[in-house]
Each structure stands twice: as structure tokens, then as C-alpha cells.
Image (cartoon, helix red, strand yellow):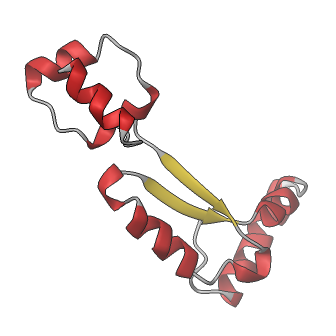
Amino acid sequence: MLEAMKALLDKNQPLIKEKLNEDDAKILSTYHFLTKRPMIIVLNVNDNKIAEDSLLTQVKERYRDYGCKVMQISAKIEAELTALDPAEQESFLKILISRNRRFTC
């Protein structure tokens, strides 16, 4: 089993792609391989590009077999939100959502 895992890693593939039977999964769980853990990919995009999802779609397709969660954010919008008090945050989010129906929180 470890040789199969090494072969996968040698091909630059994460271990999460390998389907294991219950016994092998139990054995592998004693090792703490990072590539066996679920992955999250966060794309930081320009705030005026947040509505575009072409890059998001491409990345989702590229990593489909990896079981990744892929999301798109704007760090600028995040920074602006954190600088506001809670009431202003809610108002700011309502404005963002009303301007862009694809934006969700």
C-alpha cells in the first residue's frame, strides 16, 4: 500500500485521490500526510471581477477529482468589511448583493 502511495506522490498527485479499502484507510490514518486531507482552494480576485466566474469554473474543473472546495473572494472587500462595525457590515453586504446577484455570503 505504501508503495502505491509513493507512486501516486511521485506523479505529483495527492493521496486524497486514492480510493482505499477500510483496512488500508485505517493504516494510512496513522500517518499524517497533508495530501490526504481535504483541500480548500480560495481565489483572491479583484473586487470588480468578483461576479466573473470563469476562473472559478476552470479551477473547479481542474481539481474536480481531488474533492476540493473552491471559492472566490475579494480580499479588498473582506478588508473593508472587517473595518466596519456589525451594523455597517450588514448594510454593506446588502448593497453588494443588490448590485451583484451572484455575490452570496
Q: Is residue 105 left or right of residue 14?
A: right
Q: Position of residue 47 (x, y in %)?
A: 78, 75
Q: Image quadrant of residue 54?
A: bottom right
Residue for point 71% across, 77% down: 94
The residue depicted at 23 percent of the width and 22 percent of the height is 3
**Is the residue 83 above or below the residue 33 in the image?**
below
Q: Quadrant of the N terminus?
A: top left
Location of residue 78 in the rendering, given as x and y in whole percent from the top left corner? 78, 59
Q: Is residue 15 visible?
A: no
Residue 13 seen in the figure: yes
Q: In this rendering, would 33 be left or right of 52?
A: left
**Viewer-nearest residue: 29 or 90:** 29
Q: Picture coordinates of residue 76 (x, y %)? A: 83, 64
In the rendered view of the protein, which quadrant contains the C terminus?
bottom right
Give the residue furthest to the right.
83
- In terms of image quadrants, where is residue 27? top left
Instruction: Give the percent coordinates (x, y) of residue 7.
Output: 28, 32
Query: Eyeballing the image, is 37 above or below 56?
Result: above
